Image (cartoon, helix red, strand yellow):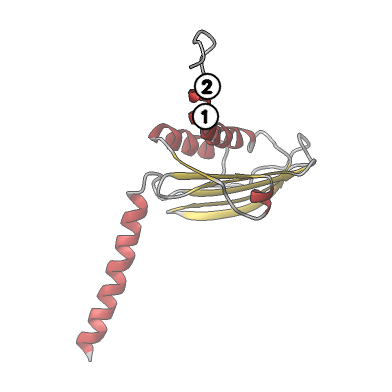
Amino acid sequence: MQSIVLVIVLSVCLGCSSTSAVKANSPTGGLSLKMSITGKDNLAALYRVEQDGSIHFGGGQDAQLNKTSWTGQLTQEDVEQLRALLTENGWFTAEPAASSTDADRKYHIDLRWPGGNRSFKVTGKGSMIAPIEDLLAKIANRRHDLFLESLPKASEPPD
């Protein structure tokens, strides 16, 4: 009986340590982020950064239904820039302040990292929100790259 208990305890402990190792070895260092944005004129956007380094985006009705329609991969530079912006803007230690700038915008944010997690709702695109939203939008705009690259260049005759 004692050996069974010992096996169970060891299994649980080893399972926990391997989960931590996976998070620490993930492309984002165990960081995940979900930012949902709503605003006037039916503005809706949803960004999700996963621990596996993927980024997901949904806009309009998809975002309102908590769905995404595009998935991309973060580069190491993207991850480093995102982590730096989150740190610089205090997201790991404080809730971003509400702002009268774009006060019609509502943000629902879930941030998780190996050392903790935070969830908050913020009104307005303030100085603590703008850099992170702008970076996520810039990365998500890569979804247009393949189409844009397929268009003829101004100096090229059409095929």
| Circle 2: residue type | Leu
Residue 41 coordinates in the image, percent (x, y): 79, 40
Q: Residue furthest bottom?
A: 1
Q: Residue at x 69, y 42 (%)?
A: 97
| Circle 1: residue type | Phe
Q: Residue furthest top?
A: 155
Q: Residue furthest left?
A: 3
The kind of secondary structure element at disc 2 is: loop
Foreground residue among 115 and 139: 139
Above or below, 133 relative to 122: above
Q: Residue at x 23, y 81 (%)?
A: 6
Q: Residue at x 78, y 39 (%)?
A: 103
How many marks the image carries: the answer is 2
Q: Is residue 42 left or right of residue 65?
A: right
Foreground residue among 22 and 13: 22
Marks 1 and 2 in Cβ contact (< 8 Å): yes
Above or below, 19 relative to 106: below
Q: Residue furthest front?
A: 159
Above or below, 152 relative to 130: above
Q: Which residue is mark 1?
A: 147
Residue 139 coordinates in the image, percent (x, y): 52, 34
Count residues near mark 1 (Cα–Cα under 10 Å), then give few for <14, some for 14-19, many for 20+.
few
Disc number placed over residue 151 in the picture, else none? 2
The kind of secondary structure element at disc 1 is: helix
Q: Residue at x 44, y 45 (%)?
A: 54
Separation of disc 1 and disc 2 at Cα?
A: 7 Å
The N terminus, quarter of image: bottom left
